[in-house]
Image: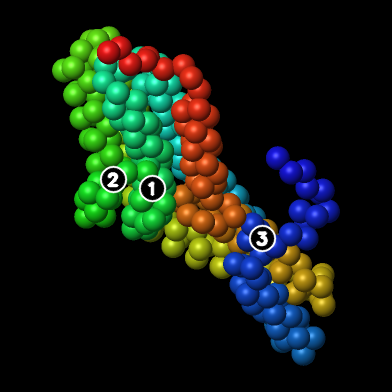
Amino acid sequence: MKKTSWFSLILQLKGSVVTAIIYRVIGCGLFGVLITVLYQLKLPVSQPSVDKIITSLALVLGLLLVFRTNTAYERFWEGRKCWGSVIISIRNLSRQIWTSVLEKQPEDRAEKEALLRLLLAFSLAMKLHLRSEPVNEELVELMSQKQYDKLKLTSNPPLEIIFWIGDYFQIQSERNCLDTYQMTAFNNLLNNMVEALSGCERILKTPIPLAYVIHLKQLILIFCLILPFQMVAQAVWLTGLIVALISFALFGIEEIGIEIENPFGRDANDLPLDGFCDTIRQNIEDLTHMETSTGFKG
């Protein structure tokens, strides 16, 4: 992993939430300046009595923001664990297929290689499925044209690939190229892949409750708009800057939760799904270049 200096990260815009919240922060800061101008014009805008309201709101906001961020990170981490399970299952499955499935006919080796490509295709199809993207040319070289055409018509491409892999195991079992214990182990690994896919779909299709999202935004806005009335007498011309800094903190924490709650996209803060698929591709390519395989017994 590339090491980045502390100061470089402070100035880095890519991956930060600054661009998403900057207009809200500026708006709150300008509102603070407006209150200061009204105060200088001797209008009764200074209201120190709202201090207790601000204290109560700060406590509630702190709890809500912590809960919001923790909930979003749990979704992010759950997505990472699901993809970790996919990688582990594919590694184990590809290794066992390569070393355990008997090769009784000359074409059996080619069929095993085709199946390993389907394991890679599963990861790519899962990535596209979670991004709501259609089946594309990434998958063309990993399967037959007939399979590719069929995959484009299905609503859940990764699950369809699982069915194809399961069919292969059933055929090999009927040919006595797999024993009962191996068949059970293979099916367990396939089940793990389906569970991981379902876990990711659960994250994708279960949004944070809208009422919670709306209420949190309303409270943050109310808090930022009340602040200038409480501090203008003491801060005077610094009121706008202080309000902007506080709103930057609050809006930033909220935006972080929004940014990571769906970790399957292409943003800088999303999971590196392309990297995961590249890892699987490299693992399978390394495996197929090994000589160890249950050889043809003619």
Q: Which residue is mark 1?
A: 141
Residue 295: quadrant of the picture: top left
Nearer to us of marks 3 and 1 is 1
Which residue was labeled with disc 2? 144
Q: CA distance from mark 3 to mark 1?
A: 33 Å
Image quadrant where one finds the C terminus: top left
Secondary structure beneath label 3: loop
Q: Which residue is mark 3?
A: 14
Front label number (2 vs 3): 2
Q: Is residue 61 visible?
A: no
Name the amino acid type tagged 1: Glu
SS at badge 1: helix
Q: How many marks?
A: 3
Whether 175 is drawn above or below 28: the answer is above
Which residue is at the front of the view, 40 or 166? 166
Mark positioned earlier in the residue sequence (2 or 3):
3
Mark drawn on residue 97: none
How far apart, in angstroms, are the residues tagged by discs 2 and 3? 40 Å
Identify the residue at horizontal 39%, vertical 56% (top origin): 137
Render colour scheme: rainbow
Question: Within 10 Å of the Cα at label 3, are there few (<14), some (14-19), or many (20+) other Cα atoms?
Answer: few
Q: Is 225 placed above or below 216 here?
A: below
Report the amino acid beneath label 3. Lys
Residue in the picture at 48% in, 19% down: 291
Image position of 71 with respect to 52: above or below: above
Nearer to me, 273 or 178: 178
Q: Residue furthest bottom?
A: 41
